Amino acid sequence: MPSNSPYSNDIPGRTRLCEDVIRSAGLLVLKGFRENAGRSFSMKGPQDFLTETDAASELLIRGMIADHFPEDGFLGEEGGGHVTDRVWVVDPIDGTANFARGIPHFCISIAYVENGNIEIGAIFNPAEDEFYIARRGFGATLNGKPIKVSATKTFDAASVELGWSGRVPNETYLRTISDLLSLGTNVRRAGSGAMALAYVADGRSDAYIELHMNSWDCAAGLLLVEEAGGVVCPFMELGSLAAGGPVLASTPTIASGVSRASLIPLATSDPNGNLLRA
Ligand code: IPD
Ligand code: CA
């Protein structure tokens, strides 16, 4: 790293950089949103939106990280990259479909992963000025205040968000919705997997499931949920940073049921899906 960098070469230094980077990207993304830049979009595939702001945000994030930690790896949704022992995993805009159509439910998501462990996770929705950050072992905050997962105990009071993508057959998605509805829970989908995980962390939702997610959509949010007292699936065992995998994050009280309905195991469950820690 450059000798004049204000960031120390450790996790606390990278946490400070992460906040500075995500706030800078937030200004750029919000400007794009307000100026309607998002409304001229192209399609990467069916239901897969791309705007000029996605690329600009990722370039800014990539550049700021490389300025201070040039040896760290980088994996971004738009520009790709490689998984290394120390790697930043970045979604420059999550919820691009919302962004492109004028809906203020989108965010930037940045995780820092060292030797396969997510050490830092940050999510920022600049349209709502909501900044989430977690450092492993140090809890999770929203705009500087500690957050906790919900205390919802029964499915008839629960709201579970279920993400959709074309990477999983519709039949599997529809079966999962049906199994969740049979439990009695409300099922939502708001179009940003990263924001959905942040909402589990702060108790606005009780669980989030997506049958396959890319790592840039979920790495930061998974740490937020864990640090806010929730339980998650063993993402790195079920999938990988490079290939993605299934995602489940939940408040502990309903996690076993959500795991059984989605067929996604919890990091802390026995082979029958029973929660071992709650
Ligand atoms: C998508 C959103 C969506 C989720 C998809 C993601 P994007 O990311 O998070 O909610 O269901 O799996 O690909 O395209 O908005 O960055
Ligand atoms: Ca994304």
Image (cartoon, rainbow, N blue to C red):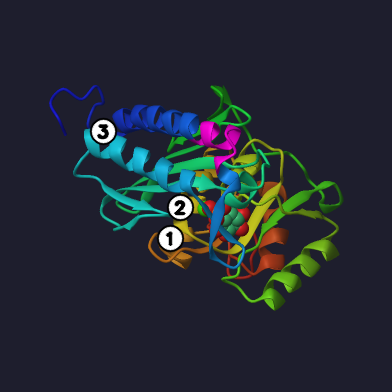
Judge: label 1 CB < 8 Å from ligand 1: no
The disc at residue 236 is 1
Give the x, y percent position of residue 19.
42, 29
Q: Is residue 32 magenta?
A: yes
Query: Disc 2 marks which residue?
Result: 216
Q: What is the spatial separation of the Cα atoms under label 3 and label 2, in whole angstroms? A: 22 Å
Q: Nearer the viewer, residue 91 or 98?
A: 98
Q: Between disc 3 and disc 1, whose residue precedes?
A: 3
Residue ID at (29%, 39%): 63
Figure check: 45 above or below 248: below
Hey, which residue is sitting farthest left in the picture? 3
Q: Nearer the viewer, residue 256 or 9?
A: 9
Q: Nearer the viewer, residue 163 or 102?
A: 102
Residue ID at (62%, 52%): 97
* Other residues around mark 1 within 10 Å, as few (<14) / some (14–19) / many (≥20): some
Which label lies toward us, 2 or 1?
2
Query: Disc 3 marks which residue?
Result: 10
Figure check: 227 above or below 45: above
Residues in magenta, as a range? 29-37
Residue ID at (60%, 38%): 36
Element at label 3: loop
Give the x, y percent position of residue 68.
23, 33
Left or right, 8 with respect to 156, comes to left
Give the x, y percent position of residue 64.
30, 35
Quarter residue 276 falls in:
bottom right
